[in-house]
Image (cartoon, rainbow, N blue to C red):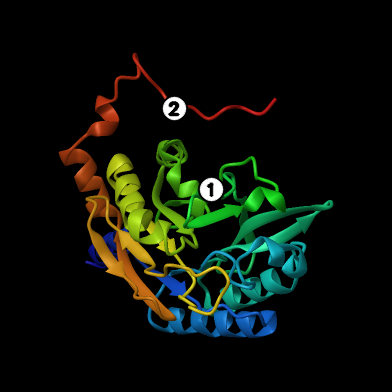
Amino acid sequence: MLVLCRAGHRMQAARAMTKFRLAVVQLFVTSDKSQNLKRASQLIKDAAQQGAHVVALPECFNSPYGTKYFAEYAETIPGQSTQMLSQVAKECGVYVVGGSIPEEDAGKLYNTCAVFGPDGGLLAKHRKIHLFDIDVPGKIRFQESETLSCGDSFTVFETPYCKIGVGICYDMRFAELAQIYARKGCKLLLYPGAFNMTTGPAHWELLQRARAVDNQVYVATVSPARDEKASYIAWGHSTVVSPWGEVIAKAGTEESITSADIDVQYLDEIRQQIPITKQRRLDLYNVEEKKKS
């Protein structure tokens, strides 16, 4: 009888490990870095108290978003912002995906996401691969490359639930990145981002649903809250999309915590029902990671 009970507990534990709660924190970012860090820390704690296992912050959570701000707010890693992330991850016993911060390293600036585990250890560091250089006549021109350098690495980290892939904002537009993450075994893709009032209503949700359906993965985006007085106005609407392409959680424009349950067993069922991974014509086409020389 004791053996059966233990086996039952093991089965319950295994089932529990296929589902976890993700919280996306839509932070209202100000020009006061200390206030941003204090507020982010509190919201991570609030999310953990609400049952989150993984908590994600928005792009540029410690700084206003804009080329004129990156150098002023830049830090090395470790530094003030990442030390806070490490501390609160350990205190709450959760995974913290630190949105992004302007990072300074060897005289260059990067848009960087640092990920910390429940023990406070640094698990991964993603430097934005695709820089946001766009020019939509009469609406918006933005050139991250005027101040930032691009990253050159894929970023995947392990949890007891599943592998998670990380991109930052503009990275989401590149389907190949998501395909490679899916091939690496990721079942959740996280994109801290700050789409604007032109690209947000047009493409924010569309891109998330496309990446989710194309790869049969969960996709989550984390935006700053909307600040109408900012020089760069973020769209908001942090979102979680299922592998079926359904929006299962969505924020408004204000500061908020939005949570969703990520069900890995449900994802596996979808992949069995529509087995596109097995049906790819790899004899005709392929997307591969380039090996560094």
Is residue 218 among what the camera can see?
no
Task: Please give the residue where the numbered disc 2 appears in the rendered image.
Answer: 287
- Choose mark 2 or mark 1, whichever is in front: 1
Residue 134: image x %, image y %? 53, 48
The three-letter amino acid code for the residue at tag 2 is Val
Q: Farthest residue toward the left?
A: 273
Q: What kind of element bears circle 1?
A: strand
Could you tell which of marks 2 and 1 lies nearer the N-terminus? 1
The three-letter amino acid code for the residue at tag 1 is Ile
Question: Could you tell me which residue is drawn at 30 percent across and 54 percent down?
Answer: 264
How many neighbours does mark 1 have within 10 angstroms: few (below 14), some (14-19), or many (20 or more)? few
What is the CA distance from the residue labelled 2 to the residue labelled 1? Answer: 25 Å
Question: Seen in the image, is 162 located left or right of residue 150?
Answer: left
Work out whether residue 106 or residue 282 is closer to the camera in this orientation and state it.
106
Work out whether residue 290 or residue 147 is closer to the camera in this orientation and state it.
147
How many neighbours does mark 2 have within 10 angstroms: few (below 14), some (14-19), or many (20 or more)? few
Which picture quadrant has residue 6?
bottom left
Task: Please give the residue where the numbered disc 1 appears in the rendered image.
Answer: 134
Query: Which quarter of the rendering shows the C terminus?
Result: top right
Work out whether residue 275 or residue 121 is closer to the camera in this orientation and state it.
275
Residue 45: image x %, image y %? 50, 82
Residue 29: image x %, image y %? 56, 77
Question: Seen in the image, is 187 located left or right of residue 119?
Answer: left
Question: Could you tell me which residue is drawn at 27 percent across and 50 percent down?
Answer: 243
Q: Farthest residue toward the right?
A: 107
